[in-house]
Image: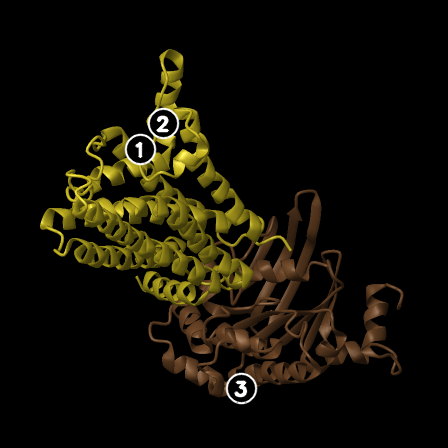
Amino acid sequence: MMVFKAAFKHELLSSLRSKSPQLVVTVFLVLTSISSIIGWLTVRNVTKIYNDIVSQNLTKAPNPFTNVPSLYYMRDSVIYVVLIGSLMSIILGAQASLRDRKSNANELIKTRNVNLVHRILGQLSAIASIIVLLEIVALLTSFILIWVIQKTPLNIGAVFSLLGYGAVSAILMIALAAIGFTFGTISKSEESSLLYPIVGWALVTFTIPQIITSIHPVALLNPTPAVSTGTGLAQSVINVISPLAVMENFKAIANAILGVDKSIQLSLVDLLSFSLFAGVGVMASVVISSKSFGRKLDA
Amino acid sequence: MTKEIAIAAKNITKNYGEKSALNGLNLSVNRGEIYGLLGHNGAGKTTTVSIFTTLIQPTSGEATINGHDIAKEASQVRNSIGYLPENVQLYEYLSVFENLEYLGKLSGLKNPRNRILEVLDLLEFKSHLHEKVSTFSKGMKQRVGVAQAILHSPEVLFLDEPTSGLDPEGVIQLREIISLLNKELGMTIFMNTHLLSEVTKLCTQIGILKNGKLIYENSLSSTIDSFDETDSLEDIYFKIDGASKP
């Protein structure tokens, strides 16, 4: 337990003081905050124009924002988690294991009686705490902004949906941080330790969904999941590779929890494949990183 | 009276694929000695230290530290050794205290604060306790490196090219520290070096490694006595090594 606690504290201090993680964390927080502010500005501008039109008796249609779900303003943040949150997590994880290798401290640690699994769990728990803390700040900002926009606080059901969305986002980012940590441990150079997981991320975010949906790549930047299309053999192939489209699965789960689009329901397949990705990602990270600890970086 | 052996190697070999790094190494270091292992680059010095510090396993042969087998009793070996690798950078964004507190806890010290202060006092480095390592010179980092190596009060200290990259002032300071640890704390010190000057000024016993084999081992005083009066240690080294002096 002492090793776990020491590694936890050490990782918190190191991550929060290192420049690269500080930068990506700031970008993530600014963007998630901006997403709610953009939502707020959109509502304000559209409502202003709507009121002008109504005052001129040009329409009798209701304000398009009158009946939107209370968490509508959160929908853009889904894509920020997929894009910025994912990359931030990979960098946080990779930097944590690279730090030991760059400083040669891994040689010191290997000459001590250290339980490496406890140490890795301590480090990953610290990174997970940072991610959870960021999610709390992002959700709190959104909660306040939605309150300002709607002039009334979220009801209890919406608060639970918000918390559920935050939990799923955090799970995705923690799994990606664990994968980044693994590549930071096993890669031969600092560059490749970031390159491999980022290429993997690009594959599951863009390439696999394109195969499944034949959708234009830019459309994959939508916060809602793309719909798979295919018949016969093509559909069979889609069924097999769909679980690998982790980011699309995440989008589907996030949208179902937020309840923004009533056509998107929580699917068992999405839930299972997402849970499997997260669970296997973290467990594999602990096993591989403890077995491969101490590898030197190429000079 | 027979002296107790602190470090021993019996017929150690280490192969990296086809390449042999150590080829039947036999070596012994008595308790309380400062042993200097000399050799050219690639002679097998770092491989030797890596085996003694349990970082790697030998391909064959046996090695013991304070009587504990490095393969079968690695845990006891680790408890009794301190290690300063070549070019250790430590954690740059953390202070001296934060670095030492972390490494102390990994060494099994439950509350390392008092021990950290004691060690830094010994190394005359207490005034830098809360300064970040990133602001330090190479010599200052080496002092923190030595501090982490002796934090858990090991009996044997391994130093891999400890003066490499240090300026002359840093070399003198580190030499004083090594001497202090040996005389005040009675530590057995094993250091790798390719600098003959270090051996002359510090070590009580020397070994010369060539192509993974120990070709010479004796006390420094006997080594100097065995050769011509006009021979410098450098001349002696090249005579033993059999290489022509550049």
Question: Eyeballing the image, is B15 above or below A18?
Answer: above
Quick one: B73 or B4, which is closer to the camera? B73
Residue most extreme to the left? A156
Instruction: Give coordinates of residue B165: x percent, y percent.
Output: 68, 73
Residue found 61% across the figure and 75% down from its top? B138
Quick one: B32 or A268, which is closer to the camera? A268
Quick one: A33 or A276, which is closer to the camera? A33
Q: Which residue is mark 3?
A: B184
Chain of the residue under label 1: A
Packing grade of label 2 (10 A; few <14, some 14-19, many >=20) is many
Is the residue at mark 2 from the same chain as the one at mark 1?
A: yes
Query: Gap in Å between the C-alphas at discs 2 and 1?
Result: 9 Å
Is the residue at mark 3 from the same chain as the one at mark 2?
A: no
Of circles 2 and 1, the one toward us is 2
**What element does badge 2 sit on?**
helix
Q: Colour of chain B?
A: brown
**Which chain shows up in yellow?**
A
Residue A242 numbered mark, or none: 2
Q: Which residue is mark 1?
A: A273
Instruction: Give coordinates of residue A45: x percent, y percent.
Output: 27, 51
The answer to whether mark 2 and mark 1 are in CB contact below 8 A is yes
Chain of the residue under label 3: B
Query: Gap in Å between the C-alphas at discs 3 and 1?
Result: 62 Å
Of circles 3 and 2, the one toward us is 2
